[in-house]
Structures are given as structure tokens and as C-alpha cells.
Amino acid sequence: MIESPLLTHLKGYIGGQWLGADSAETLAVSNPADGAHLADVPKMGRVETLRAIDAAAAALDQRASLEQRARWLQQIAKALRAQREEMGRILTMEHGKPLKEAQSEVDYAAGFFRFCAEHVDRLGPRTLEERPRNCSWDIHYRPAGVVGLITPWNFPIGMIAKKLSAALAADCACLIKPSAKTPLTMIALFSLLERELDLPAGKVNLVTGSAAPITDALFEHPAVRLISFTGSTEIGRELIRKSAEGIKRLTLELGGNAPYIVFDDANLEQAADNLIANKFRGGGQTCVCANRILVQGEVAESFAEQVAQRVRRMRVGNGLEEGTDLGPLIDDNAVAKVRRHVEDALSKGARRLAGGNAGAASGNYYPPTVLIDVPKDALCNREETFGPLVPIATFQDEAEAVRIANDTEYGLAAYVFSGDLERARRVAEQLHFGHVGLNTGTGPTPEAPFGGMKQSGYGREGGYEGLYEFTEAQTLPHPE
Ligand code: NAP
């Protein structure tokens, strides 16, 4: 069992109270590093969700000023920074990522609350003139209503921070459903919210349990106006269908298939270092991880060797141990997917430069692996691998790089490395991806809008664009 001062309640949080499931059923949470049982959390469903929506609807009536919202947001940012070590430890135990990375994720999360606190005044009303009639209108940014926030397991605090910060800035009341694989970090966050803030009861609610009945209740209830979801494209599609009946607004942050393009004039060392940092973040289980490594013909072999050298030095192990570079994958299915992608690529002619053989995985671990000469029809070029695989393929010229990079239904993140910035910018403009890094493999920040094009979803998180996601603009005549 996990012990933590932030986990004294292993429960959901509804209407300002810690509650179990009505049925008293629970779900087990385990540590992917060794399979150890960490905790049991309530297996809630429809009834508890409806209760939480009612609590949230009641809390919506208590409107908060912009100053009050800014204060809450700053308090959350401060509480997260103060508890980064403990939050990080809980996160590592349920997710598996190295401790330093988990603590950086807590800092990253705090950044979203800070950003929204500093810019919430943008949501104040603005006045505009209507020339022909010589009158004025006020535009008010109203809270969208009760909002459902559904998050995946790969960033247990980062993903909710993006949503909750903007939802509180807009003065919405929230129901949060974390992934059943990583609910503990969220429970820890709620302990902080309860301890450090004076939020009205029902303003934030936590419902742990089975995804389908919880989301179905969110879609059915008229008080819920918006559902913000981060997860797979497959489930995103299902939610779009479900949203039709009640015309619910959706924000969808879905899957990716990021191309990482390295031109022959790039600084190869810099490109290799950035690839390691990008690709192996969270064990390769992030939506912005490079999935297809495209290298210009002449330098492919030497670039691949530089990456392989770095990969051979990586230490794989329990994320809590000092010096671990790569933790376990989240579960057996994740390991099986990486294995399938590696075997498929090898069977189609790829060569392995680093990594164990496909059978070398033990437990939830998979050795970081580098393949070269990966053919275009390999599975890993079509699907998100979501694991520590670096599949390298070659291209001949700019046009071919752009064509291959865009040859995917996804459009989340892409990266371009070139010594010629003009060329890098020219290529970036032709890429259909919401985020494009130039000579860097870094991902989203609180200051910039982030989100997908094509089947990677719609809506934006972060930046001013993200601030408006949870609002409804209402136009009223300006008082005389
Ligand atoms: P997932 O299976 O789609 O799950 C995401 C969330 O949806 C979880 O809370 C999950 O609950 C819930 N869920 C599962 N089945 C559902 C259903 N039928 N109806 C409603 N909700 C349901 O995705 P995941 O495996 O957790 O996360 C990995 C995916 O997320 C990858 O594709 C990754 O690219 C994407 N992602 C995208 C972004 C972005 O910003 N675009 C960021 C991070 C991750 P349970 O876990 O309890 O089943």
C-alpha cells in the first residue's frame, strides 16, 4: 500500500465531501514498476456522477469575481510547487516515470494555474462600437456551465492542470474523471484543494471509477454543457457521436503520430540529444513523442548511430531509483504493442541498432530500441507506438519529407531540424500539425495554445486561446 499525507482519503470528492461508491465496490491501483498493489479507490458510476453534477450545478450559482479566481489559481500553483516532491513520488509510483520527470510534471502543471491566474482578467467584459447604428455592445465571457474533465494516465497531473486551470478561470463548476490507472495523483490534488483553498462545495468534484457509465451520465445530464477530453482518437470519435443528442461542446486532445524530420545540414548531435529527451519522456508514452524519425538519406546512418550510442547508455528501471532514465510501461498491453511494432518492422526489413530482441522485455519493461531502414508500410509508421521505439526511415528532399510527414490522419506535434532556418520555417508552414518545434524537441508550454489538427482533435489548451475554451460569449447592449 502507498502511504502519503496527501492520500489520507482514498475516495472520490463530491459536493465538498470525501465519498466512496454507493456499492462500496473499489478498483485496485498498482505500481507498473513491480505490480505491487498501491491502493483501492471507489468504483463509482452513474449514480455518483449524477450526484456530482447536481452538486456542481448548485455551485455554479455562486459566481466568483475575477480577483477571487486569480487568487484560487495562484493558491493551487503555490500548493503544487510546495508539494512537488510528494506529488511526484505518488505520480511515479502509479505511472512509472522517473521521479525527476514526475516532479517536473508537477512544476509544469503549476505553470498552467499560474498562467491562468496572471491572465484571467482577459475574461472580463469588453465593449465594442456598432458604427451604423451608433450604439455599443458589451461582450461578456460567461462560464460554459458544469464541465466534465476526462483525463488519461500518461500525465496524471499535467493533463488535468491544463483543463482545470482554464475551467476555474472561466468560473465553471467541474466534474473530474481521471484514468482508473492513475487516480492517486488526482486524489492528492484534491487533498491540496481542500486543505489550501476555500472553494465552494461542489465547485470541483472527483469521480473515480468506470469510464463508460461516468461519461454517459455526463452526456445525458442537461446541466453539463462541455466535456473536455484528453485520450485516444478512438474514444474521441465515440464521444463526438455521444455529444450529438444534447449538443454538448467538446474539447478533444487526441492521439498523435509525430514526425521528427532531420535534414542533412542539421546539427546531428543536437538533433540526437533532443530526440532522446523527446522520445523517451514518460517511457515514450506521450502524445507529442516523436513517432516517425525521418532523416535525409546521406546522414541517416550516422545520425542513427549517434542515437543508438545514447540509447545503449540509458538505464531502465524503477522510476524511484536514482539514475533511472526510463521507467516501465503502463501495463502488459502497452508492452505487447511495442513488441508487435518492433517485430513487424523487423519482418519488413528494418535493422536493429540498439535494444534487446523483441522477446527481451520483462514485466512492464521494454528496452529502448533503435531501428533503421523502417519501411513506410510498417505498423509503427501508421499507429502511435506509445513506447520506447525509435524507428528511423529516410527521405531524399524537402518535398518528400513534407509528403511523408503529412501522410497520417493525425496532426498534433512535429519537429524539424535543419541548419537553414529559412528552410525549417518553409517546411514547418507546410506541416499540418498544431505544434511544430524547430531545432527543438520540446512540447507545449502554458503560454502557448496547444492542440491538434485533423484527427488529433479540436480545441486548444494553454495560451489565451485555452483561456476562452470554457467560456460562452454573450452580447448585451452597453448600458446608456
Ligand atoms: P483512452 O483509453 O482514450 O482514455 C482516456 C480517458 O478516457 C481515460 O480517463 C479513460 O478512462 C477514459 N475512457 C476510456 N474508455 C472510455 C469510454 N468508452 N468512454 C469515455 N471515456 C473513456 O486513452 P489513454 O490510453 O488513457 O491515453 C493515451 C492516449 O491519449 C494516446 O492516444 C495519446 O496520444 C492521447 N493523449 C493526447 C494528448 C493531447 O494533448 N492531444 C495528451 C495526452 C495523451 P480509464 O482509463 O479509466 O479507462
Image (cartoon, helix red, strand yellow):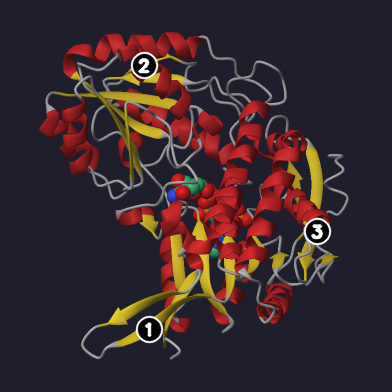
245 relative position to 407: left or right: right
For disc 2, the marked residue is: 270
Which-is-in-front pick, marks 1 and 2?
1
Separation of residues labelled 3 and 1 (CA atoms): 39 Å
Identify the amino acid type marked 1.
Trp
The mark that comes first in sequence, 1 or 2, is 1
- Is the CB atom of the residue marked by disc 1 within 8 angstroms of ligand 1's nearest atom? no
What's the residue at 60%, 19% (across, down)? 316
Residue 333 position (above or below residue 338): below
Of residues 464 and 377, the one nearer the viewer is 464
Q: Position of residue 90 (x, y in %)?
A: 74, 39
Q: State which mark lies toward you, 3 or 1.
A: 1
Lower sequence index among marks 3 and 2: 3
Assign a secondary structure to mark 3.
helix
- Amino acid type assigned to the residue bearing label 2 in the image: Gln
Examine the rendered structure and indicate whether residue 434 appears above or below residue 222.
above
Q: Which residue is mark 1?
A: 137
On the image, numbered disc 3 is attached to which residue? Answer: 194
Q: Nearer the viewer, residue 25 or 340?
A: 25
First in sequence: mark 3 vs mark 1: 1
Q: Is residue 253 visible?
A: no
Residue depicted at x 66% and y 33%: 103
Q: Is residue 234 left or right of residue 107?
A: left
Q: Residues within 10 Å of mark 1 (few under 14, many from 20)?
A: some
| Left or right, 229 with reference to 91 | left
Residue 260, picture quadrant: top left
Residue nearest the viewer, comparing 274 with 345: 274
Image side of residue 385 versus residue 393, left or right = right
Dot 3 amino acid type: Glu
Measured as percent of width and height from the top left, residue 92 is found at 69, 34
Which one is in front, 138 or 328?
A: 138
* Tally of numbered tags: 3
